[in-house]
Amino acid sequence: MTHSLHRTGSETSLKKDYVFLCTPAKGVNNEGARDKLIKILDIIMEVGPTNIGFYGYGSKVDGICIEDIKKRMHDNSRLRCCFDDREKLKEVLKRIKAEEFGLSITVSGLISEILEISKKLSLTPHTVNISCGVFGKVNYLPDKRITEITTMCGHGMVGYRLTEDTIDQLKKGEIDLEKAIHTLQKPCTCGIFNPTRAREILQRIIYEEDDTKSESQRRSEADELGAKIRVRPDPVAAANR
């Protein structure tokens, strides 16, 4: 799969963005895959993804219940989630390797980071896809800061106009950072939209564009915006208590 391959941004930003996909192959290894997928899901939840989704049911932002996901899973289901910490992804891969499930795992991130993880875990990638960027009349594309957000949904469900409108509302004080992130990640039912990274991008946009205040004021307000979202209860954890 390459729909998670074209995420844009700086190296620093992308070092906090890793996508995980697990897909049984119909007619090859899908028979009896449901039990394996449930075990892999348990591993993912134990380690802690920043987002996770299940097609047709919703994502973490919707407060999905992991037990309900398990009931809906079948041999051809797919697991999709993302992490904001390389060590968490590494731990998930380490545990999956130890179990020898025999299912296809796809990981997206900076190629240098992914290859380093693979080397440390003695994993040899079967296939490597590399995004070479966007060519053509790139002047028609939205601002790069906008595409940093929109490309976190590879199916294009997080549109640039939605993103621009959400940022505009955030700047005007009509919504807070928590609401902005919720609005942007909700259309991505796959669950690979990274809310942690979205928070940092939005804070950066607000900080860089507000030239009516001193640097200390802007930094303080950016930190305050971040604090609001950090104290938000985890809907997945709450649903599984």
Image: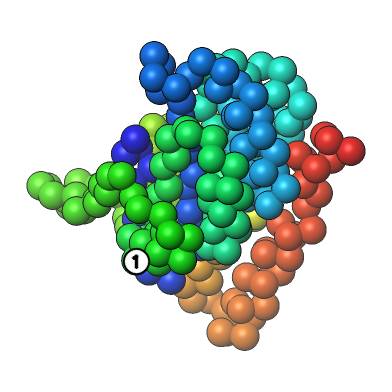
Quarter containing the C terminus: top right
Q: Is residue 116 above or below residue 198?
A: below
Residue name at image x 39 percent, y 14 percent: 27
Find residue 5 and report its horizontal and vertical position in percent: 33, 46
Residue 207 as seen in the image, left or right of residue 149 = right
Element under label 1?
A: helix
Q: Is residue 212 above or below residue 100?
A: below
Residue beneath label 1, please? 112
- Rendered image quadrant of residue 184: top right
Quarter containing the N terminus: top left
Find residue 240 and report its horizontal and vertical position in percent: 83, 35
Find residue 12 and report its horizontal and vertical position in percent: 43, 71
- Rendered image quadrant of residue 218: bottom right
**Circle 1 Cα neighbour tier, 10 Å, few/some/many (<14 / 14–19 / ≥20):** few
Residue name at image x 34 percent, y 66 percent: 112
Q: Is residue 224 above or below residue 177?
A: below
Q: How is the image coloured?
A: rainbow
